[in-house]
Image (spheres, grey):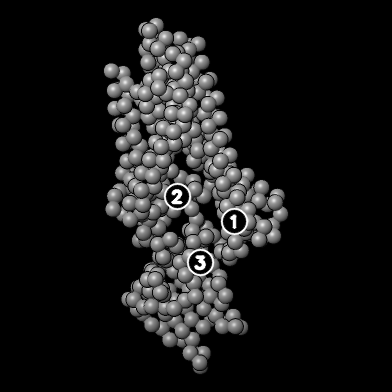
């Protein structure tokens, strides 16, 4: 029995490694041809581009592990069915659990590896890769300081201090704006709890506006809502918004607690926190799904069918995962529900297909 388990584990591990390598190669080749023109226009050496793509490797591996597990499971069992190995095992009275056990064990190990990449390697390498792309290649301004999401940002004669940045939503929370003249003397200051882009200009709410008069004195105005025409647009802040993959779970949890204690919106970060926990389990879910599909399709399985089925199933899963995250960002559903719904639905589907295959 141990020989059979070792054989299945070894064959599955080899195919998973091949599938993961193929996924990484395809991803990097596509990404290379999409970005290399930007590196050349920025007049950066090819060694800098190579450094950038090396730094992206942990993120690519972390995202590719679940798909490699699914593809490896389908192909391994498909080939065993095609060569009648599964039929021989069944005829010998060997329980299907002997086949399932090594696959589930490897999937659990893959989930642990995925989590380790997400927690320890990806935050470090993604931060450096994003710096190279945003600052060195795209020549975007670097924030003066950046502690998680607290940003000091200088643009011309204006300095922004933003407590919570939601650039993609066109939303600034806990914002202070200092405006200077050509001699770098303070001319005005805006403090507001919230600033929102309405498509044409910024609308700030619950704030105070202080402005220097010609005689050197200052005027103070409290307001509930006021429109300001600033040069910066939401897209100018997007590269400053720290992505969730750049933070560990501890950093995300600490930041969520901080901004919630100050009364700011933490919905997006709470969703990302639960997603970082749920996503590594994708490898286990993909393995269960692969087992069910492979056993159900029987001898009709093979490399071509396995690859096609795995790509289609992985696409459906990741589409659902991103869709649920989008719903979660709006605050419609609880973050924990949003993050775990795809895994739960696919786990139920996997168990159903497996039960049908056993009949």
Residue 122 picture location, percent across and down? 54, 44
Residue placed furthest toward the bottom: 215
Query: What residue sits 48% from the left and 37% below the top?
Result: 115
Residue 226 picture location, percent across and down? 36, 78
Residue placed furthest toward the top: 92
Q: Would you name the residue on which mark 2 appears?
A: 252
| Label 1 residue SS | helix
Q: Is residue 138 above or below residue 51?
A: below
Judging depth in this view, the residue of 129 and 292 nearest the camera is 292
Query: What residue sits 51% from the left and 78% below the top?
Result: 179
Q: Residues within 10 Å of mark 2 (few under 14, many from 20)?
A: many
Judging depth in this view, the residue of 30 and 202 nearest the camera is 30
| Label 2 residue SS | helix
Q: In the figure, is residue 317 to the left or right of 136?
A: left
CA gap between label 1 and label 3 equals 15 Å
**Quadrant where the image shows the C terminus:** top left
Q: Would you name the residue on which mark 1 appears?
A: 133
| Label 3 residue SS | helix
Q: Is residue 283 above or below residue 250?
A: above
* Residue 108 visible somewhere in the drawing: no
Q: Is residue 25 above or below residue 174?
A: above
Q: Would you name the residue on which mark 3 appears?
A: 236
Q: Which mark is residue 205?
A: none
Which badge, 1 or 2, is on the more N-terminal residue?
A: 1
Give the number of marks: 3
Query: What residue sits 38% from the left and 74% below the top?
Result: 203
Query: What residue sits 42% from the left and 9% below the top?
Result: 88
CA gap between label 1 and label 2 equals 23 Å
Q: In the figure, is residue 347 to the left or right of 211?
A: left
Q: Nearer the viewer, mark 3 or mark 2?
A: 3
């Amino acid at each position: 029995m141990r020989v059979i388990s070792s054989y299945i584990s070894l064959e599955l591990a080899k195919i998973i490694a091949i599938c993961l390598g193929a996924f990484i190669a395809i991803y990097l080749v596509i990404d290379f041809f999409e970005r290399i023109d930007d590196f050349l226009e920025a007049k950066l050496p090819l060694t800098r581009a190579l450094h950038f793509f090396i730094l992206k490797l942990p993120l690519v591996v972390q995202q590719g592990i679940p798909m490699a597990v699914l593809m490896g499971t389908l192909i391994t069992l498909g080939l065993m069915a095609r060569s009648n190995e599964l039929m021989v095992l069944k005829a010998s009275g060997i329980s299907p659990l002997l086949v399932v056990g090594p696959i589930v064990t490897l999937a659990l190990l893959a989930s642990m590896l995925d989590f380790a990449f997400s927690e320890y390697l990806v935050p470090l390498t993604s931060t450096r890769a994003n710096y190279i792309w945003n600052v060195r290649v795209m020549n975007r301004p670097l924030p003066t300081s950046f502690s998680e999401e607290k940003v000091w940002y200088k643009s011309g004669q204006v300095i922004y201090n933003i407590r919570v940045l939601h650039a993609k939503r066109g939303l600034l929370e806990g914002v202070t704006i200092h405006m200077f003249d050509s001699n770098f003397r303070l001319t005005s200051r805006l403090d507001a709890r919230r600033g929102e882009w309405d498509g044409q200009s910024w609308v700030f709410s619950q704030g105070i506006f202080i402005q220097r008069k010609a005689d050197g004195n200052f005027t103070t105005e409290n307001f509930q809502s006021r429109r300001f025409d600033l040069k910066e647009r939401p897209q100018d802040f997007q590269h400053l918004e720290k992505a969730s993959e750049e933070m560990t779970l501890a950093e995300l949890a600490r930041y969520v607690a901080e901004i919630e204690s100050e009364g700011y919106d933490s919905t997006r970060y709470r969703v990302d926190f639960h997603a970082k926990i749920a996503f590594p389990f994708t490898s286990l879910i993909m393995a269960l799904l692969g087992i069910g599909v492979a056993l159900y399709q029987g001898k009709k399985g093979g490399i071509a069918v396995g690859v096609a089925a795995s790509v289609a199933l992985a696409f459906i899963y990741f589409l659902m995962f991103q869709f649920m995250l989008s719903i979660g960002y709006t605050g419609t559903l609880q973050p924990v529900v949003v993050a775990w719904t795809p895994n739960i639905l696919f786990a139920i589907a996997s168990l159903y297909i497996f039960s049908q295959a056993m009949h």
